[in-house]
Image: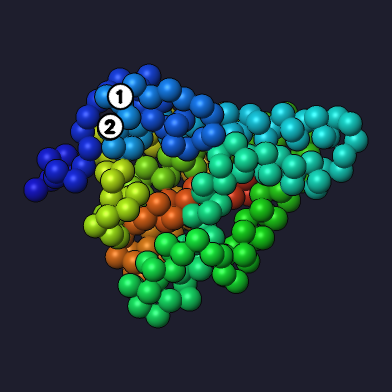
């Protein structure tokens, strides 16, 4: 059975406005009123709008960075404030996923790893993953320094990294037969390619050099997360998708630094 006809794959086309509502309602703290028929759709039906859900997150971070930079706050602290703002705007959804996915590395069996990921407590691996992720993101912004460069890099990173989540949803089956990932469904091939094209368009906002390096770095990071999830969990969960987003976002911000140095 092909991916397009597999009943696991979501083929509903609710209209792009409704896709935006689904994506914003789930991936951000922005209050969105979902019509009843839209609220009953699986999250994968809104997959094409995932990159657009990154836009207000990026803009919130960029605005805070620009204000901090303008009033004389050092770039490193401005970067930390921007990252904190982005985490608040998204409800720290992806940071939580990264921490849980990292903590799962301490489990000896697949079942134990999945159990750890459902535990609301955070362990040593999770704390270390968050410290590294926040440090890399804030550090990258501080080295970009100029607010105009920061807003372009953040928009490219936040939006394209959420397209990587859709790719992971498509290629990996849910690791559980219940839970968020299973209920979300899997975007079909056409929706996945549409989303990657949208993500690539956002990457180009930061310039062709950043787009090239960003695509390569994000692809490598996404592949690494997918391989680890496949080998350690047998599929993806919501936490895996959060780890994919964080990894890809960091990769794109680092790519912006590489492009700036050329």
Q: Nearer the viewer, residue 134 or 201?
A: 134
Q: Nearer the viewer, residue 36 or 17?
A: 36
Give how far across and how far down residue 119 sits, in percent: 46, 64
Identify residue for label 1: 36
139 vs 86, left or right, is: right
Identify residue for label 2: 40
The image quarter containing residue 153 is top right
Q: Residue at 67% of width from left, 60% of height from top? A: 131
| Marks 2 and 1, how far apart at CA | 6 Å
Q: Nearer the viewer, residue 251 or 112?
A: 112
The image quarter containing residue 188 is top left
Q: Are marks 2 and 1 in contact (CB under 8 Å)?
A: yes
Q: Answer above or below: position of 259 versus 12.
A: below
Give how far across and how far down residue 138 sits, in percent: 71, 48
247 vs 230, left or right, is: right
In this view, the residue farthest toward the right is 72
Q: Nearer the viewer, residue 61 or 140?
A: 61
Q: Residue at 65% of width from left, 31% of height from top? A: 60
The image quarter containing residue 231 is bottom left
Q: Residue at 32% of width from left, 53% of height from top? A: 179
Q: Answer above or below: position of 114 versus 171.
A: below
Is residue 42 at all visible to an observer of this figure? yes
């Amino acid at each position: 059975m092909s991916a397009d006809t597999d009943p696991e794959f979501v083929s509903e086309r609710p209209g792009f406005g409704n896709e935006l509502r689904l994506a914003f309602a789930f991936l951000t703290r922005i209050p969105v009123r979902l019509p009843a028929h839209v609220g009953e759709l699986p999250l994968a039906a809104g997959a094409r709008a995932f990159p657009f859900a990154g836009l207000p997150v990026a803009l919130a971070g960029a605005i805070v960075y620009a204000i901090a930079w303008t009033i004389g706050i050092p770039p490193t602290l401005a970067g930390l404030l921007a990252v904190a703002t982005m985490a608040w705007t998204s409800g720290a959804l992806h940071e939580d996923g990264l921490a849980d996915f990292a903590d799962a590395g301490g489990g000896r069996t697949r079942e134990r790893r999945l159990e750890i990921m459902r535990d609301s407590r955070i362990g040593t691996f999770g704390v270390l993953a968050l410290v590294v992720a926040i440090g890399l993101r804030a550090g990258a912004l501080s080295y970009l320094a100029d607010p105009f460069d920061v807003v372009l890099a953040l928009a490219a990173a936040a939006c394209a990294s959420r397209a990587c989540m859709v790719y992971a949803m498509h290629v990996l089956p849910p690791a559980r037969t219940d839970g968020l990932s299973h209920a979300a469904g899997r975007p079909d091939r056409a929706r996945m390619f549409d989303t990657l094209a949208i993500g690539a368009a956002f990457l180009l906002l930061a310039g062709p050099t950043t787009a090239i390096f960003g695509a390569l770095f994000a692809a490598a990071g996404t592949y690494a997360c997918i391989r680890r999830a496949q080998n350690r969990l047998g599929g993806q969960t919501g936490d895996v998708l959060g780890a994919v987003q964080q990894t890809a976002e960091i990769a794109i911000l680092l790519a912006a630094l590489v492009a700036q140095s050329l």
